Amino acid sequence: MSYKQGKNLRKGRVSSPGNVYLITTVTHQRQPIFSSLSLARIAIRALYFHDQQETLSTLSYVLMPDHLHWLFQLHNGSLSEVMRRFKGYSSRQVNLQRGGNEGVWQAGYHDHALRKDE
C-alpha cells in the first residue's frame, strides 16, 4: 500500500464511543498466514483481549487465511489505537510461534461506521 492510499483510508475517519464499526484488514502481501489453525487461534485471542480490557465489545468476526473482518462496538479509545494494539500484539505472538520476525499485517485498514438502520 502506498503512502497516498493509506492517507486516503484515514480521510473522514472518526472514532466515536458507542458506535459499531466494521473493520477489514489484510495480511502482509496477502499471505495466507491464518491457514494455520494455531496461528488463527492467536489472532482470535488477540481480538478478545480488547473485550477483556473493556475497550470494545466484539459482535462478530470472520478470520480468513489472508484477511480479517471484525465487527465491534467501541467503548473507549480510538480505532487507530485499537488496531495498533491488535496488530502489534497478534504480530508478536504469531512471530513467537513461527520463530521469526516477519511481517504479519499490511499497514492500514478499512473501517465503516454502521448506521442505526444497518
Image (spheres, helix red, strand yellow):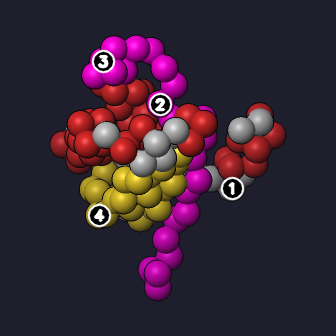
Q: Secondary structure at mark 4?
A: strand
State which tag comes first along the sequence, 4 or 3. 4
Question: CA–CA distance between discs 1 and 2?
Answer: 26 Å
Mark before the other along the chain sequence, 1 or 3:
1
The spot of residue 57 in percent (x, y) is 27, 56
Q: Amino acid at mark 2?
A: Val
Mark-to-mark CA distance, 4 and 2? 24 Å
Q: Contact, CB < 8 Å: mark 1 with mark 2?
A: no
Please say whether residue 100 is one of the residues in the magenta stretch.
Answer: yes
Comes first in the chain, label 1 or label 4: 1
Q: Residues within 10 Å of mark 4 (few under 14, many from 20)?
A: few
Please indicate whether residue 114 sits to the left or right of residue 1 in the image: left
Residue pointed to by mark 3: 96
| Residue at image mark 1 | 12
Considering every residue shown, the one lying at the far bottom of the view is 117
- Report the disc number at residue 59: 4
Disc 4 marks a residue whose amino acid type is: Leu
